[in-house]
């Protein structure tokens, strides 16, 4: 097992000290990163002690250490999952051959594009969330936000390491650019559209960590299968950290729902206006936020039919999440049944070469994973004795990318007229009024253990500590 050099200027388990040139290049990038964190990271919490976990190993058990750290002193570093001996390529045309330790020249630009696109989302999310700390509903939540933020910063390091180590001068230039683009910047925005929208309320933050970050999880799972071994190992360790982000999203939404159910019981009504008047977020609003965030996350997977995705698969660049569970790892003459609009208000099925359908296959796995939370949340509602069901909308609803882009459908995915669709959008997506109601609840709560009125406390604290632990020392 590789050991992590924690004393090094850049903590790492890639023997950075043995490669002076690479070490120097990364040490040159490090102050630029810290400047970026200072200017674009969480605003106004610089000197505060935050109870953070830091990676100290890459073993799934016991890889992290907990303690108070001011965020600018977080030990961002380079951590790759251990190398599997004799790892073979698990899919595509090169299946069965040795995994690559270097990037083959012919796939260099494809790999670079994938790594840069993934790398760009990591700092983008930190930028999107930079003001959220001011309205945290509890110290527990404030700490979780900061934990997610520092780890997204570390994920940037993970991608920058690959760029520096395997892509020469081009890679170093791309690494600089990752700090020059900024979320929402007019001239130099982040690469993917969704990552340019500010996240200014905590319901959106929980939706982001549940739906958008989960897209990241599925991209990482696909890259963890890559024939390029350093990329596979990097993303495998990122997934270990990512699990906490999924947890923040799922439990965050769950606590909003729990609070709303408590209020519904207290006032003996499920009327949205009455629930709001009592200071909680009504379930109808939660559902609208889900519809919005789910449909925008689906667009991140790209077009269902994509020859790029096909060549990534054929060439071993990017596999499917948990590739080993699929029966066929070559998919040479196989087809995917794709449902498309028939142009007459209905739906028909078309055959698509399986390799070109990899975005759809990955997205379907994502949708299944999204459903798990809904089962839990609906159980909470049922146990509280209310007859409401939260639902994922159809993956055809409200799309901007792919075969269903701009096709008016209802929430179940049935094509409808433009008029019906426009009317539906008013009730299915958050209105300006819904957003300003949610915004009106955003006030900072700083007393240890206390929660804002719109969210229930978590079941337990971090790392076996009590919920009322002082997770961030603000004074
Ligand atoms: Fe990340
Ligand atoms: Fe994440």
Image (tube, rainbow, N blue to C red):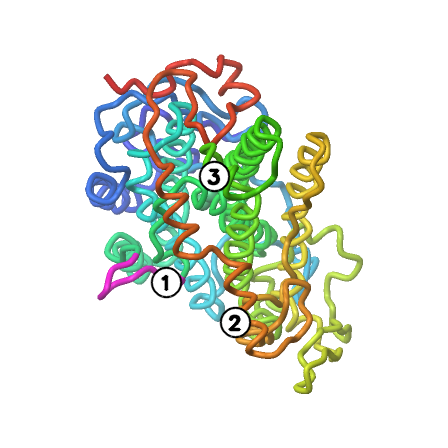
Spatial CA span between label 3 and label 1: 37 Å
Q: What stretch is highlighted in magenta?
A: 184-193
Q: Do the residues labelled 3 and 1 touch (CB within 8 Å)?
A: no
Name the spot of residue 73 as percent of width and height, x first: 27, 27
Name the spot of residue 188 as percent of width and height, x first: 25, 63
20 with respect to 345 (left or right) = left
Classify the position of the C terminus by image quarter.
Answer: top left
Where residue 200 sits, quadrant-wise, is: top left
- In the rendered image, residue 188 lying in the magenta stretch gets the answer yes
Between marks 3 and 1 in the image, the one whose residue lies nearer the viewer: 3
Between marks 2 and 3 in the image, the one whose residue lies nearer the viewer: 3
Name the spot of residue 253 as percent of width and height, x first: 54, 38
- In the rendered image, residue 328 lying in the magenta stretch gets the answer no
Q: Residues within 10 Å of mark 1 (few under 14, many from 20)?
A: some
Q: Main secondary structure of the magenta part?
A: loop
Where residue 94 sits, quadrant-wise, is: bottom right
Q: Where does label 3 land, which residue? A: 276
Q: How crowded is mark 2: few (under 14 residues within 10 Å), some or many (20 or more)?
A: some
Q: Where does label 2 land, which residue? A: 422
Name the spot of residue 23 as percent of width and height, x first: 29, 41
Tell me the residue at 39%/56% (across/down): 432
Q: Where does label 1 land, which residue? A: 191
Instruction: Give the secondary structure at mark 2.
Output: helix
Classify the position of the N terminus by image quarter.
Answer: top right
214 with respect to 40 (left or right) = right
Spatial CA span between label 2 and label 3: 26 Å
Query: Does residue 24 show up?
Result: no
Between marks 2 and 1 in the image, the one whose residue lies nearer the viewer: 2
Q: Which of marks 2 and 3 is nearer the N terminus?
A: 3
158 with respect to 427 (left or right) = left
Frontmost residue, 138 versus 242: 138
């Amino acid at each position: 097992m590789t050991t992590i050099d924690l004393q090094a200027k850049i903590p790492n388990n890639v023997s950075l000290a043995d490669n002076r040139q690479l070490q120097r290049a990364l040490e040159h990038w490090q102050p630029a990163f810290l400047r970026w964190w200072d200017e674009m990271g969480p605003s106004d919490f610089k000197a505060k002690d935050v109870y953070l976990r830091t990676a100290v190993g890459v073993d799934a058990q016991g890889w992290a250490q907990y303690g108070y750290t001011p965020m600018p002193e977080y030990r961002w570093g380079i951590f790759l999952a251990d190398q599997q001996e004799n790892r073979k390529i698990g899919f595509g045309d090169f299946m069965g051959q040795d995994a690559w330790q270097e990037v083959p020249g012919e796939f260099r630009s494809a790999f670079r594009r994938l790594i840069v696109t993934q790398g760009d989302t990591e700092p983008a999310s930190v930028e999107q969330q930079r003001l959220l700390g001011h309205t945290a509903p509890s110290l527990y939540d404030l700490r979780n936000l900061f934990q997610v933020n520092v780890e997204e910063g570390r994920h940037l390091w993970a991608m920058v390491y690959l760029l520096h180590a395997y892509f020469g001068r081009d890679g170093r230039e791309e690494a600089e650019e990752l700090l020059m683009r900024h979320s929402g910047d007019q001239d130099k925005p982040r690469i993917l559209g969704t990552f340019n929208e500010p996240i200014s309320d905590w319901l959106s933050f929980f939706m982001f960590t549940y739906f958008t970050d989960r897209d990241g999880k599925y991209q990482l799972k696909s890259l963890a299968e890559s024939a390029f071994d350093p990329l596979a190992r990097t993303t495998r360790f990122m997934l270990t950290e990512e699990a906490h982000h999924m947890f923040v999203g799922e439990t965050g939404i769950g606590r909003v729902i729990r609070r709303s159910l408590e209020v519904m019981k207290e006032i003996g009504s499920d009327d949205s206006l009455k629930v709001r008047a009592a200071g909680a977020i009504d379930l109808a609003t939660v559902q609208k936020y889900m519809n919005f965030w789910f449909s925008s996350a689906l667009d991140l997977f790209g077009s269902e039919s994509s020859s790029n995705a096909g060549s990534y698969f054929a060439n071993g660049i990017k596999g499917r999440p948990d590739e080993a569970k699929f029966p066929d790892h070559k998919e040479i003459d196989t087809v995917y049944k794709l449902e498309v609009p028939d142009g007459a208000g209905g739906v028909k099925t078309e055959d698509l070469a399986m390799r070109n359908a990899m975005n759809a296959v990955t997205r379907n796995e994502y949708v299944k994973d999204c459903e798990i939370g809904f089962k839990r949340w609906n159980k909470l509602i049922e146990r509280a004795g209310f007859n409401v069901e939260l639902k994922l909308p159809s993956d055809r609803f409200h799309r901007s990318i792919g075969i269903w882009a701009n096709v008016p459908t209802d929430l179940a995915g049935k094509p409808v007229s433009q008029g019906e669709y426009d009317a539906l959008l008013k009730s299915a997506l958050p209105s300006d009024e819904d957003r300003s109601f949610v915004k009106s609840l955003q006030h900072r709560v700083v007393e240890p253990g206390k929660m804002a009125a719109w969210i229930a406390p978590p079941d337990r604290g971090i790392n076996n500590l009590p919920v009322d632990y002082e997770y961030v020392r603000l004074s």
